[in-house]
Amino acid sequence: MLWCSVIVAAVMHWCLLGTGDVEIGVLEPSGTVAAMQVRDVPAPMPSHAVPTPVPVVQRSHPRASIEGVAAPLAEPAPSVASSGAIETPSELAAIPADTELVNALAMPAGPTEVTVPVYRTEMPPAATLHYELRKGSLSGSGELAWKPAADRYEARLEGSVAGMNLITQISVGVFDANGLAPLRYTDTRSRRAANAANFQRDKGKITYSGPQVEYPLIPGAQDRVSWMIQIGAILNADPKLATPDGKISMFVSGASGDADLWVFRYVGAETLRSDSGPLHTVKFTREPRKVYDRSVEVWLAPTRHHLPVRARFTATAGGDIFELLLRDIQSP
């Protein structure tokens, strides 16, 4: 009995000592435990602060450079897009800025400096473009209203399906030596509150109504509506850009803390049909740089002051397509 008691006591003692904290990880061949790599989510920051990089798992591929911009080695997690979305803005309370791009834009001349050219522009006259809207298997109507004034402008893009408004994007601003100079851009989607980007020209930065991130406001920067007019104004002033190897670059910001360098490359000339007859167009494309980005194709009509008579947005992830096809153009 004594030996039995000793054995039972020893077993119970071993079990108690073996119930410590368990560290989750991968057992290495050496017997040590490697800690898991995790993503840290930063706390909300003041609107005047540029957030520091979010720690992420680094990819093993080498650093690449596209049009002078160092491509990030890691991409943000995808967000859920609602019906009718042209882009895929994040739903997080705080979205990390593309810190490499911010630093490259802000730093003085150097090997990693981002050079975004500026162009002469010739603004098109006021017009309202009516489109057929297609999103996947759905179809509806779209409208781009371009309203320039003496020193200010408003550009409004709206889209609806079956009488339900899917999207309203509004850009208001002024004109400067580089063309359109947005002051405020708002993006409203169905069943979602509006988001806004503020181009604070007196402070030299772009801030947002939701995400606590900011970007330097560089000359010629545009938003997700104004670029559709700006690219035509550039071609009005210099049609030779619509030739082989021609390209137009601009820094474009959305309303959800998403901003990037967009490089449009000339593809060729195409003839499109419209309610008023065939239209000769020049086509430019913008290729996505990031995993959850979108490709952009735009057809511009030289005889209509290079206004966009067709536009197609294709999601890299999933292949979702949003398209606008011209029905007619009205002058005021």
Image (tube, rainbow, N blue to C red):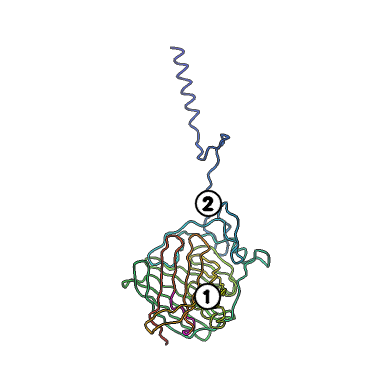
Please identify the quadrant where the N terminus is shown: top left
Q: What residue sits 54% from the left and 69% below the top? A: 262
The crowding category of the residue bearing disc 1, from other C-alpha atoms within 10 Å (few below 14, some 14 to 19, many at least 20), is some
Callouts 2 and 1 close, C-beta under 8 Å: no
How far apart in space, not on screen, are marks 2 and 1 (Cα)? 33 Å
In the rendered image of this protein, does residue 1 appear above or below residue 167?
A: above
In the rendered image of this protein, does residue 278 appear above or below residue 107?
A: below
Q: Assign a secondary structure to mark 2.
A: loop
The kind of residue tagged 1 is: Leu
Q: Which residues are magenta?
A: 303-310
* Residue 211, x across and y down, in percent: 50, 63
Q: Quadrant of residue 265?
A: bottom right
* Residue 55, x across and y down, in percent: 56, 52
Q: What residue sits 52% from the left and 57% below the top? A: 75
Q: What residue sits 44% from the left and 68% below the top? A: 313
According to the picture, the residue beneath numbered tag 2 turns out to be: 40
Q: Considering only order in the chain, which callout, 1 or 2, is on the residue closer to the N terminus?
A: 2
Please identify the quadrant where the C terminus is shown: bottom left
Quick one: which residue is furthest to the left in this view?
162
The kind of residue tagged 2 is: Asp
* Residue 115, x across and y down, in percent: 62, 70
* Residue 297, x across and y down, in percent: 47, 71
Judge left or right: residue 59 versus residue 307.
right
**Residue 304, magenta (yes or no):** yes
**Residue 302, magenta (yes or no):** no
According to the picture, the residue beneath numbered tag 1 turns out to be: 183
